């Protein structure tokens, strides 16, 4: 059982102090919309800390174990799904190099939750800790960071794949497309640094300052960190409505307003980008149909262009309705991994991706989010994200793009560099 305490935010620095205060705990999930006015969002920001219970699994029967944990807990749970949980759903494998070694699935039941909307905060504390509410608020209000992490002086980012090798691999992907094996696939590459120490919270704050994305996340599970500036929602359930908002289509920003508007308008009418997006919309419609009430799958928004700090993005919104008998985890199971990070047909694309990519994706192109006690959920897509294993001092970020028959390998490479720009700037200062 939880007690609820509501108060009005008076400090302009409250969110920063709250996030800094959260670092005293071993398990943390922070989700922040950066005040983007999302049509489907319930909160401006959410913080969950300090596990009462948790679940960590490999890929074997992962969704069954999550289903049991979510049902038995019957409470808020926060955590993540890695991309490689695909192996639990299909006869697939992940044998590529993994420098991060994150658990495949992690969720926890937090003792303390903060739900922020406008200037109001709801604190949902388990009864065992509800006597700590006043002291926690005092700590947060007075919080000053008194312990600096000894970070590496210089971080040299390395490419897992050389430019020439990347171009060869995209051409190999195009050969699969021209042969008719697939229509589209999301092909990714890793940038990484070894034997480095970063300050996760400062790195996240710098990344968030640059990107100000609507689905940012800071996740800590002891030595495992995800610092995500994601612009993309994977899947949300609210009552009997399910919402997916895949992104496909990217254009760079320009400092000059006239040029920037021109780049945005060009993206709107770009046939290649629109075809990428529409192919994934069809895939998502099919995925949602597995759990939807017949005839309820709708495209609410097709190829709309939204502007973010670093890029313009083409986003579509697909919705469905589900019966109350459909479990939340079964909706995730039938749509995972998200179509925007796989391709079409999905299984064939994932097999080809595994053969051509050099790095195991892990949490990259997975999802971070939560379930609430009513069985609703909200998850982002882990892109534009820095992943860090503090124990083995390995830091990584990956970027990718959709390869279709109209793709030019060099243009795809340049698009990857645009997407990687913010992460590289933050890490290399």
Image (cartoon, rainbow, N blue to C red):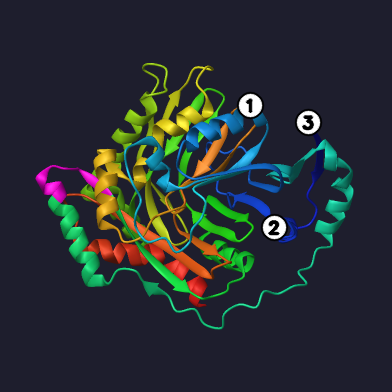
The residue singled out by tag 1 in the image is 374
Q: Is residue 193 left or right of residue 350?
A: right
Mark 3 → mark 1, Cα distance in angstroms: 14 Å
Mark 1 → mark 2, Cα distance in angstroms: 26 Å
For image coordinates 34% across by 54% down, the residue present is 95
- Find residue 43 and report its image quarter: top right
> Residue 263 at what x, y percent from top left?
32, 59
The kind of secondary structure element at disc 2 is helix
> Residue 244 at what x, y percent from top left?
43, 36
Which numbered disc, 2 or 3, marks the residue that appears first in the sequence? 3
Judge whether residue 276 can be spotted in this image. no
Q: Spot the residue most to the left.
A: 179
Mark 2 → mark 3, Cα distance in angstroms: 25 Å
Along the line of sight, which residue is nearer the eye, 266 or 237?
A: 237
Judge whether residue 222 can be spotted in this image. yes
> Residue 390 at what x, y percent from top left?
58, 66
Does the stretch in magenta take in 189? no
Which numbered disc, 1 or 2, marks the residue that appears first in the sequence? 2
The residue singled out by tag 3 in the image is 1
For image coordinates 63% across by 64% down, the residue present is 201
Do the numbered discs 1 and 2 sit on residues whose CB atoms are within 8 Å?
no
Q: Is residue 269 above or below residue 395?
A: above
Q: Spot the residue most to the front.
A: 60
Q: Is residue 22 left or right of residue 77?
A: right
The residue singled out by tag 2 in the image is 19
For image coordinates 50% across by 62% down, the residue present is 386
The kind of secondary structure element at disc 3 is loop
**Residue numbers of the magenta segment:** 176-185
Does the stretch in magenta take in 177? yes
Do the numbered discs 3 and 1 sit on residues whose CB atoms are within 8 Å?
no
The kind of secondary structure element at disc 1 is loop
Q: Is residue 213 above or below residue 184?
A: below
């Amino acid at each position: 059982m939880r007690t609820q305490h509501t108060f009005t935010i008076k400090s302009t620095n409250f969110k920063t102090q709250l996030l800094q205060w959260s670092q005293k705990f071993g398990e943390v999930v922070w989700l922040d919309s950066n005040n983007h006015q999302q049509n489907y969002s319930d909160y401006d920001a959410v913080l969950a800390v300090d596990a009462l219970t948790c679940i960590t699994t490999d890929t074997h029967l992962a969704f069954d174990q999550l289903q049991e944990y979510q049902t038995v807990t019957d409470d808020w749970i926060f955590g993540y799904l890695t991309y490689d949980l695909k192996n639990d759903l299909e006869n697939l494998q992940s044998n590529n190099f993994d420098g991060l070694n994150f658990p495949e699935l992690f969720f926890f039941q937090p003792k303390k939750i903060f739900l922020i909307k406008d200037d109001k905060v709801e604190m949902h504390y388990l009864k065992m800790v509800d006597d700590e509410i006043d002291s926690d608020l005092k700590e947060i209000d007075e919080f000053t960071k008194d312990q600096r992490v000894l970070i590496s002086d210089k971080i040299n980012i390395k490419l897992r794949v050389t430019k020439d090798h990347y171009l060869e691999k995209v051409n190999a992907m195009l050969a699969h497309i021209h042969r008719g094996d697939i229509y589209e696939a999301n092909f990714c590459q890793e940038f990484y640094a070894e034997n480095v120490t970063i300050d996760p919270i400062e790195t996240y704050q710098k990344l968030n300052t640059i990107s100000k994305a609507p689905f940012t996340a800071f996740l800590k599970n002891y030595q495992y960190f995800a610092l995500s500036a994601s612009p993309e929602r994977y899947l949300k359930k609210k009552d009997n409505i399910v919402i997916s908002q895949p992104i496909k289509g990217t254009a760079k920003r320009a400092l000059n307003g006239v040029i920037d508007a021109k780049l945005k308008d060009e993206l709107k009418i770009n046939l290649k980008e629109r075809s990428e997006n529409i192919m994934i919309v069809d895939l998502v419609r099919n995925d949602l149909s597995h759990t939807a009430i017949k005839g309820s799958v709708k495209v609410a928004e097709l190829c709309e262009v939204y502007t973010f700090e670093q890029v313009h993005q083409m986003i579509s919104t697909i919705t469905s309705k589900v019966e109350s008998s459909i479990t939340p985890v079964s909706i995730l199971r039938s749509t995972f991994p998200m179509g925007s990070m796989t391709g079409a047909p999905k299984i064939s694309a994932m097999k080809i991706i595994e053969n051509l990519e050099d790095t195991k994706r892990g949490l990259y192109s997975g999802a971070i989010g939560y379930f609430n006690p009513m069985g609703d959920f909200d998850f982002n897509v882990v892109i534009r994200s820095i992943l860090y294993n503090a124990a083995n001092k390995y830091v990584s970020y990956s970027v990718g793009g959709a390869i279709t028959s109209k793709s030019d390998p060099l243009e795809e490479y340049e698009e990857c560099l645009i997407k990687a720009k913010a992460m590289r700037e933050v890490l290399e200062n």
